[in-house]
Image: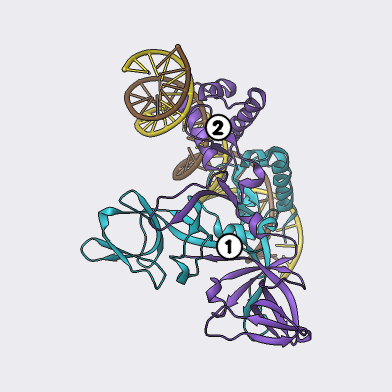
Chain colours: A cyan, B purple, C yellow, D brown
Amino acid sequence: MLTTQQKKVQDFIRAFIQRHGHSPSLREIGEGVDIQSRGAVHRHVQTLIDRGVLKRARSGWRTLQLVDPEEMSTSLPLLGKIAAGRPIEAIPGHDEINIAEMLLGEDRYVLQVEGDSMIDAGILDADLVVIQRTDTADDGEIVVALIDDEEATLKRLFHLSGRRIKLVAENRNLAPLIYPADRVRIQGVLTGQLRTYR
Amino acid sequence: MLTTQQKKVQDFIRAFIQRHGHSPSLREIGEGVDIQSRGAVHRHVQTLIDRGVLKRARSGWRTLQLVDPEEMSTSLPLLGKIAAGRPIEAIPGHDEINIAEMLLGEDRYVLQVEGDSMIDAGILDADLVVIQRTDTADDGEIVVALIDDEEATLKRLFHLSGRRIKLVAENRNLAPLIYPADRVRIQGVLTGQLRTYR
DNA sequence: TTGAAAGTTCTCAAAAAGTTCACTACTATT
DNA sequence: AATAGTAGTGAACTTTTTGAGAACTTTCAA
């Protein structure tokens, strides 16, 4: 549990964020709970972070966040695994899954897939795919590739010897394509996929 | 979280748009928050854009827009459709997609699929499926069904004559199962599916 | 086509905020 | 009395943010 001082600091931070919409600086916290030393305030804040009550959104100023609020809005309960012929089996250690956190991220965007060229990878016509912007990818990853600065395509990528690149459609009816590396520009790699029914 | 200065800039822009109906120029922002340097103002604006608080409607002058705080946290840009052999094609009318909104909802939960029984429906082993809790479903919908109050399974459902129910695995190697209706309890229907890579 | 207005990129120096540390003091437990 | 845990102070240090100004590119309308 938290000490009374730690709780005071936590309460002050919550109130400050509530009122100002952004987190207080250490000096402001100090003024709020009547501590002169920024060092002491820092130690309190650090303990709260260690206890998991607070977190820093990133390094920098005024980046403190309360952990508990939020979270709820983008989560769903994760009941467990379903397999044909067995009862639903709980997954130990997980009971909530944050949908947004799984798919969102810096420099990501969404594309709608048209066609069946990735059908064997479980990506169907009209599915949405989440792409992470990057210009490099490892062998075997599914990438958005731009060919001759003109055609865009979603394919599994392999580097071949002799500065050539193989782009594989995951569809047994389509043959792999091989290009010299300088005709292919990688625009992003596949990081997520989603579909809605009904 | 924004710094005080960034917040000042944001507030000024909001007020300016409110009053004038269009966004301010960098110089006007500078005058508003008392910064001489257009470069400095530009840096503030750029950070606000990076943080997702602002966006540019298009390139050009006075094209800043405030992002709806609701959508901010769970949206990704929707660039368009991708099909093999063509440039990425923009989808008119859509430029953002709210991931959370698509998948979340009352009485929904997530299951992790084990096995390949739905592979022809593009649902692979280890995929996550979002299930809407309900005890009825229409023909052709994919449901979580409980058989004899014991086995759980994810199958496509059809009602047959004579109070019988057909459960179809979307896998050409597995035959459909037919049960009397009283041995099958529907627990929910599939409303979403997602997968992450990397 | 052209020029002014607007946006972008850069470097520099300074200010503001966060971090670490040594020292001290109070309290509760052993 | 010794020990450990919690606190506060103040100084030194590092990192991040900031504003200024100059040079450059893009946009837009005459």
Quadrant of the drawing holding the C terminus of chain A = bottom right
Q: Is A138 left, or right, of B6 in this rendering?
A: left
**Residue C5: x %, y % from top left:** 47, 18
Residue type, mark 1 in image: Arg
**Which of the pair B190/A43 is nearer the observer?**
B190
**Which of the pair B131/D18 is nearer the observer?**
B131
Residue at the front extreme of this rendering? B161
Q: Which mark is residue A168?
A: none
Which residue position is annotated with label 1? A195
Q: Residue at x 66, y 23 (%)?
A: B19
| Disc 2: CA contacts within 10 A as few (<14), some (14-19) or many (>=20) | many
The mark lying in front, picked from 1 and 2, is 1
Q: Which mark is residue B64?
A: 2
Q: Is B52 left, or right, of A139 in this rendering?
A: right
C-alpha gap between disc 1 and disc 2: 32 Å
Q: Secondary structure at mark 1?
A: strand
Vertical arrangement, residue A180 with respect to residue B112, above or below: above
Q: Residue at x 69, y 56 (%)?
A: A73
**Residue A36: x %, y % from top left:** 65, 40
Residue type, mark 2 in image: Leu
